[in-house]
Image (cartoon, rainbow, N blue to C red):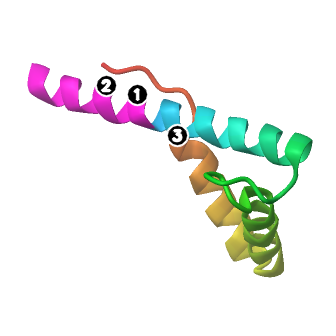
Amino acid sequence: MSGLNTIKALIGGLTELALMLLALAIVLALLVGSNLPFFGGVTANIMAWVKELGSNGLVGLIALGIILWLFSKRTVS
C-alpha cells in the first residue's frame, strides 16, 4: 500500500509543478508578450480553451467542474 501512496504523491507533485509552470507562463506572457521561446502562446491557448468550454453550455460547465475537482487539493491517505 505504501507503493501506491508513493505513486500518488509523485503524481501530485508533478501536477503541482505543472500548475506552477503554467502560472509562470501566464505572468511572463502578460509581461513580455506572446512570443516567448519556451512558453509560446499559452494565453491564447487558455482563451481558446475557455471559449470552447463556454460554447458547449451545460456540457462545458460539467467538464469545468470535473477539471476543478481533479485539481482541487486532496490529501494522500
Boundaries of the magenta span: 1-14
Tell me the CA gap for discs 2 and 1: 6 Å
Please determine whether, in this image, residue 5 is positioned above or below residue 30: above
Q: Which amino acid, mark 1? A: Gly
Would residue 9 be found to the left or right of residue 22 on screen? left
Callout 2, which amino acid? Ala
Specify the quadrant of the image occupied by residue 12. Answer: top left
Q: Residue at x 71, y 37 (%)?
A: 23
Q: What residue type is labelled 3?
A: Ala
**N-terminal-most mark, 1 or 3:** 1
For disc 3, the marked residue is 18
Q: How far apart are marks 2 and 3 (CA)?
A: 14 Å
Q: Is the magenta stretch mostly helix, strand or loop?
A: helix
Residue found at x 10% / y 26%:
3
Q: Relative to residue 58, is residue 23 depicted above or below?
A: above
Q: In which quarter of the image is residue 13?
A: top left
Tell me if residue 75 is in the magenta stretch. Answer: no
| Residues packed near mark 3 inside 10 Å, few (<14), some (14 to 19) or many (20 plus) | few
For numbered disc 3, what is the local secondary structure? helix
Question: Where does the image place residue 71, in percent across and percent down from the top left?
Answer: 55, 40
x 74%, y 62%: residue: 41
Neighbour tally class for label 2: few under 14, some 14-19, many 20 plus, Cα within 10 Å: some
x then y, percent, for residue 38: 61, 52
The earlier-in-sequence mark between 2 and 3 is 2
Q: Is mark 2 on a helix, strand or loop?
A: helix
Proximity of marks 1 and 3: CB atoms separated by less than 8 Å: no
What x and y, as percent, mark residue 77?
A: 30, 19
Q: Mark 2 points at which residue?
A: 9
Q: Does the magenta portion include 12?
A: yes
